[in-house]
Image (cartoon, rainbow, N blue to C red):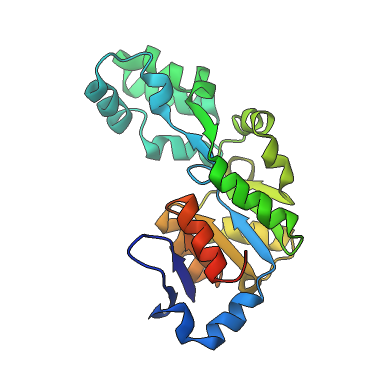
Amino acid sequence: MIIVKTRKSSKNICLNSILPLSVSSQTAIKISMINTIIFDLGAVLIDWNPHYMYRTIFTDEEEMKNFLATVTTSDWNEEQDAGRSLQEGTEILVKQFPEHEANIRAFYSRWEEMLGEAFWDTVEIFKELKESNKYKIYALTNWSAETFPVALARYEFLNWFDGIVVSGAEKMRKPAPEFYQILLDRHDVKPEDALFIDDNYRNILAAEKLGIKSIHFTSAPKLKETLIEMEIL
């Protein structure tokens, strides 16, 4: 398996162990066969952060962070990403934390306020890959089916993808291998021909187990540097 990490501490490609790019010509040959790029969206191309909205509710930063860490947690939000309805998710939490009802309901009633700008440096990389006409480019995203249309209307570049697989619509999410398989099967993608880009390392590991070469995203400059080293850009 090949994993490419874009951390500042490493410019290496891992082929079962960490190897510099120049060490393995066999690795370079395999990389040259890539014809499909698969992007994650949140934290890679799109800035989404509940802090943006909740800072208008809470006056104390630590109180806000504690609310997000203990009430509207990432685990709770991921259940909606996996297909649970926003209403059901909200009511479950209100019943559990009735003292926070107003702030819980704000999570989805004011969800659009959590969207920030696109990460334009990454969008430019996406554009360059798209305009090369060398690759089919897809998105594989953990996102509620109910909120994704808001993003689709807001970020025009989402229409550049050859296909988008949304977890909420499929009732499953990363890192479940079946979710990756939906994209591979639907778009006739061979794992060995694909490159996956995601900011969450658990999702990178899941892709690797399926035989998909992967880049752990940490920044647009490091992503571009790695893609150039791989002769993809």
Residue at image point 49% right, 51% down: 220
Given residues 85 and 147, the one toward you in this image is 147
68 lies left or right of 125: left
* Image quarter (top left, top right, bottom left or bottom right) of the C terminus: bottom right
Residue 225, given in percent of the width and then of the height, sits at: 50, 62
Residue 112, given in percent of the width and then of the height, sits at: 54, 23
Residue 125, given in percent of the width and then of the height, sits at: 60, 52
- Residue 171 seen in the current view: no
Given residues 117 and 191, the one toward you in this image is 117
Looking at the image, is 170 positioned above or below residue 11?
A: above
Q: Residue furthest right?
A: 133
Given residues 45 and 84, the one toward you in this image is 45
Residue at image point 47% right, 82% down: 22
Looking at the image, is 84 positioned above or below residue 180?
A: above
Looking at the image, is 218 positioned above or below residue 35?
A: above
Residue 226, given in percent of the width and then of the height, sits at: 50, 64
120 lies left or right of 34: left
Given residues 106 and 217, the one toward you in this image is 217
Residue at image point 29% right, 23% down: 64
- Residue 100 seen in the current view: yes
189 lies left or right of 98: right
The quarter of the picture where residue 118 lies is: top right
The quarter of the picture where residue 231 lies is: bottom right
